């Protein structure tokens, strides 16, 4: 019984250490993604690009596309490289497909942590409860040791939730930001195709 108490105690501590490590990893991804997403688009950029398209200022639009510092600027460059409406659509789609890997970097990790960290914490809780029952069976009078084991078990669940909740929130925020950038590029593409089609017509 003493061996069981010792093993479960160390396993609970190992689970806690794993959760803390996952928390650090998650925070590092959030910081990196936040910095990366600051360069995804500029405030008011879409309206400026749409204005250039409406005014048929192709030189100004081409100059903006040459910068390629944001995703929308890259999409502008890809759209201008195509001559016809159908080719513009394919060119922008191909560009967004190429950018998707960099846009979604770390998102899978955040989603995985958000869905699985509570279960890791629950595993630590189960181990802590087993340890508490082991202490109770060996020394029924050791109430302090039993209470410590139960507290440690509950802390494991709390840490699991502490890792999961920020990861889920960050994943949803970043996913919304990515959808917004993609929608901006598609709106620019549709506007450009309609204006060029009107000119050709």
Image (cartoon, rainbow, N blue to C red):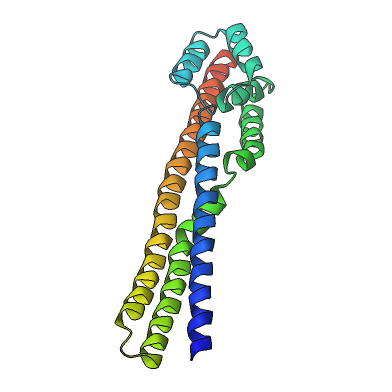
Residue 53, how many percent across, how many down? 52, 14
Query: How many marks do you count on the picture?
Result: 0
Query: Does 170 appear above or below 154?
Result: above
Q: Nearer the viewer, residue 199 or 2?
A: 2
Judged left or right of residue 155, residue 25 is: right
Judged left or right of residue 140, residue 183 is: right
Judged left or right of residue 67, residue 189 is: left
Residue 25, how many percent across, how many down? 55, 50
Query: Does 29 appear above or below 65?
Result: below
| Residue at image coords 60%, 9% | 58
Residue 140, how many percent across, how many down? 32, 90
Query: Does 33 appear above or below 82?
Result: below
| Residue at image coords 53%, 17% | 195
Residue 134, how many percent across, how many down? 42, 87
Q: Nearer the viewer, residue 58 or 63?
A: 63
| Residue at image coords 49%, 88% | 2
Q: Nearer the viewer, residue 36 or 27?
A: 27
Q: Quadrant of the C terminus?
A: top right
């Amino acid at each position: 019984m003493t061996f069981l108490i010792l093993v479960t105690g160390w396993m609970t501590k190992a689970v806690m250490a794993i959760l803390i490590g996952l928390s650090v990893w998650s925070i590092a991804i959030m910081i990196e993604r936040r910095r990366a997403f600051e360069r995804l688009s500029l405030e008011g950029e879409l309206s400026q690009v749409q204005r250039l398209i409406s005014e048929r200022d192709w030189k100004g639009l081409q100059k903006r596309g040459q910068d390629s510092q944001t995703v929308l600027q890259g999409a502008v460059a890809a759209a201008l490289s195509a001559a016809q409406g159908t080719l513009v659509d394919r060119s922008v789609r191909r560009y967004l497909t190429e950018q998707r890997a960099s846009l979604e970097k770390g998102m899978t990790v955040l989603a995985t942590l958000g869905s699985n960290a509570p279960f890791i914490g629950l595993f630590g809780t189960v181990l802590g409860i087993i340890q508490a029952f082991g202490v109770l069976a060996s020394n029924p009078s050791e109430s302090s040791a039993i209470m410590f084991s139960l507290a440690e078990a509950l802390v494991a669940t709390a840490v699991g939730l502490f890792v999961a909740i920020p990861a889920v929130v960050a994943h949803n925020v970043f996913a919304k930001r990515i959808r917004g950038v993609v929608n901006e590029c598609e709106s620019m593409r549709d506007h450009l195709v309609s204006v060029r089609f009107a000119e050709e017509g």
